[in-house]
Amino acid sequence: MLSNAGVPHVIIPARIDEGMVKEALRAENAPPRDIADTLAEMKARKVSDKNPGSVVLGCDQVLDHRGELLSKPADQQDALAQLQGLRNDRHTLLSAAVVYEDGKPVWRHVGVVRLRMHDASDAYLQDYVARNWDSIRHSVGAYKLEEEGVRLFSRIDGDYFTVLGLPLLELLSYLTLRGDLPR
């Protein structure tokens, strides 16, 4: 998304144990918004500490379905179970972005999108998972809106980029106001 928007960047993975962090925050009854924000901040801080003088963006996304946080599916059966649980119901995607500079947070935003899935048949969902497994196995909720997954939905309230995992419009506005991007 950053490349398509003409934002120069370098990708540096931040190695954190997301599962452990989520588990600890859930044990403290942290809301999904705080979980997404904390994970994004931890990623940004870890990379920023090793790259002084750089502007570092950390991102994370969580899917909240009736108080349950869904993770990336472990296998095709898990993907099918996630989709069956989401069908004919609403869920929320929260995409957090945190910008660090010189080891300190300077900007953050959590985008929220509410989605409603059609009442898809078991047969369609099974076929969908089989056809799209290589792509959806890396996505919470076992779908990608930018691909065939869009057919699963009857309503989407919120920003498209936030669904993809980054509140891009807000980030671009911030970078422009800072002077990092031309007006």
Image: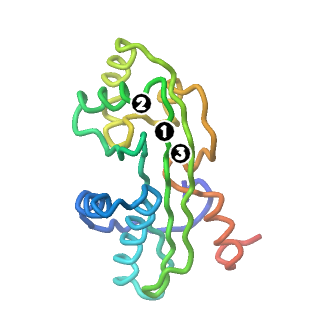
Mark seen at residue 51: none
Which of the numbered marks, if any, corresponds to residue 91?
1
| Sequence-first disc among 1 and 2 | 2
> Upstream in the sequence, badge 2 or badge 3?
2
> Which residue is under mark 2?
86
Instruction: Tell me whether circle 1 and circle 3 mark residues in contact (CB < 8 Å).
Output: no
Q: Secondary structure at mark 1?
A: strand
Cα distance between the residues tagged 1 and 2: 7 Å
Q: Is residue 128 above or below residue 90?
A: above
Q: Position of residue 60 (x, y in %)?
A: 42, 58
Q: Name which residue type carries label 2.
A: Leu
Q: Secondary structure at mark 2?
A: helix
Which residue appears at 59% of the width and 53% of the height? 4
Tell me the kind of residue under disc 1.
His
Residue drawn at 54 percent across, 53 percent down = 1
- Looking at the image, residue 11 lies above or below residue 153: below
Q: Tell me the CA gap for discs 2 and 3.
A: 16 Å
The residue under the point 36% across, 68% down is 12
Which circle's residue, 1 or 3, is located before the other in the chain? 1
Q: Residue 163, labelled with which disc?
A: 3
Tag count: 3
Q: Nearer the viewer, mark 1 or mark 3?
A: 1
Asked whether the residues under the numbered discs 1 and 2 touch, taking CB atoms below 8 Å apart as contact, a structural biologist would say yes
Choose top left, top right, bottom left or bottom right for residue 28: bottom left
Residue 17 x %, y %: 24, 63
Q: Position of residue 145 (x, y in %)?
A: 51, 35
